[in-house]
């Protein structure tokens, strides 16, 4: 019933009989697989976050992690380009933010996203944080109401303004990234020195800076269109326009992208503050 499995970059039969046949080329088996191809790293000691509506947070490994602890923490092993393994966890992404905006715009005028994030960035950090992997945040609907309920359950001050809710969401995402990356490194026995954020979420400067603050590691943001670029790079190599392995493809991605680096410590949020926030967010 199912076709044979093929590696990314396999050139198949022409799909269309035009004046010149158009070949079909297999690429990454998931959009995250294509996005990770474009991670502009120069080291193997990196974590990645494919950030958008959802966030895929993990490491690139040579072999899967098949422990019971890994399974219980809901990490997955997915095959990537050139025999790599994407060891990752699916984390809630900017979906919560976009759904909150949808709720607000039913009753109040729209606010440009950059203005919203700038206003949120002026507020006190970590005033209210929640577990962004809570299943209540999955379906569409009144996200601010659900966030307020979660804040109450964990004994925190409930955000009152839209900017306070925005700050809660972005702080909480950075906190969730911190936990996911720490767990992945622990279970894979891997130390990292940089975090790469690719995809649309890499344009959220407050989220990128807070991720650096939460993890204590530098963050490199970009490329924005990682999935499309990775798809193109694999096809280009398959057709002979490019050559080499992942390192060479990533060199092309670096040269083709505007990247921004964020260093930890800029906002003056201590690791103790993040640890305290973690206890509050995951209090039960």
Image (tube, helix red, strand yellow):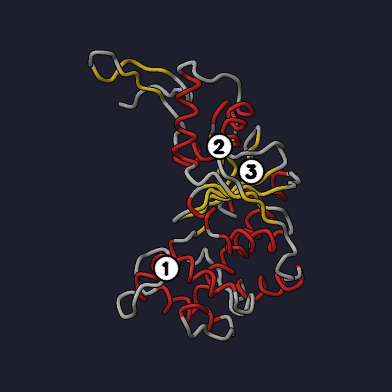
Instruction: Indicate the position of residue 270 as horizontal and vertical percent values.
Output: 76, 70
**Residue assigned mark 1:** 112
Instruction: Indicate the position of residue 252 as horizontal and vertical percent values.
Output: 58, 30
- Badge 2 local density, few (<14 within 10 Å), some, or many (20+)? many
| Quarter location, residue 121 | bottom right
| Quarter location, residue 235 | top left
Q: Which of the two marks, 3 or 2, is nearer to us in this view?
A: 2
274 lies above or below 196: below
Distance from the alpha carbon under mark 3 to that under mark 2: 14 Å
Instruction: Confirm whether residue 43 shows in the render.
Output: yes
Q: Quadrant of the N terminus?
A: top left
What residue is rendered at 44% in x and 38% in y?
Answer: 228
**Residue assigned mark 2:** 38
Instruction: Indicate the position of residue 153 as horizontal and vertical percent values.
Output: 53, 82
What residue is rendered at 73% in x and 46% in y?
Answer: 192
Q: Quadrant of the C terminus?
A: bottom right
Q: Which of the two marks, 1 or 2, is nearer to us in this view?
A: 1
Badge 3 marks a residue whose secondary structure is strand
Q: Earlier in the sequence, mark 3 or mark 2?
A: 2
**Residue assigned mark 3:** 59
């Amino acid at each position: 019933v199912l076709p044979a499995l093929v590696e990314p970059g396999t050139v198949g039969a022409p799909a269309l009989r035009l004046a010149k046949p158009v070949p079909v080329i297999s690429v990454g088996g998931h959009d995250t697989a294509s996005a990770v191809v474009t991670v502009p790293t120069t080291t193997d000691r990196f974590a990645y976050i494919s950030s958008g509506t959802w966030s895929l947070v993990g490491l690139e490994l040579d072999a899967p992690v098949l422990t019971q602890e890994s399974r219980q923490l809901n990490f997955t092993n997915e095959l990537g380009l050139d025999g790599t393994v994407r060891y990752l966890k699916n984390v809630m992404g900017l979906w919560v933010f976009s759904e909150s905006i949808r709720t607000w715009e039913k009753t109040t005028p729209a606010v440009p996203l950059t203005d919203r994030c700038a206003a949120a960035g002026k507020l006190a950090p970590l005033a209210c944080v929640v577990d962004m992997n809570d299943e209540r945040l999955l379906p569409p609907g009144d996200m601010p109401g659900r966030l307020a309920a979660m804040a109450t359950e964990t004994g925190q001050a409930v955000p009152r303004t839209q900017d306070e809710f925005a700050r809660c969401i972005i702080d909480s995402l950075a906190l969730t990234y911190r936990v996911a990356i720490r767990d992945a490194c622990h279970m894979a026995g891997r130390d990292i020195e940089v975090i790469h954020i690719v995809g649309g979420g890499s344009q959220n400067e407050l989220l990128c800076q807070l991720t650096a603050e939460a993890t204590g590691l530098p963050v490199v943001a970009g490329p924005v269109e990682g999935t499309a670029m990775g798809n193109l790079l694999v096809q280009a190599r398959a057709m002979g326009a490019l050559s080499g392995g992942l390192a060479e493809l990533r060199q092309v991605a670096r040269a083709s992208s505007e990247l921004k680096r964020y260093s930890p410590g800029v906002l003056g949020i201590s690791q103790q503050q993040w640890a305290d926030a973690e206890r509050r967010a995951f209090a039960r």
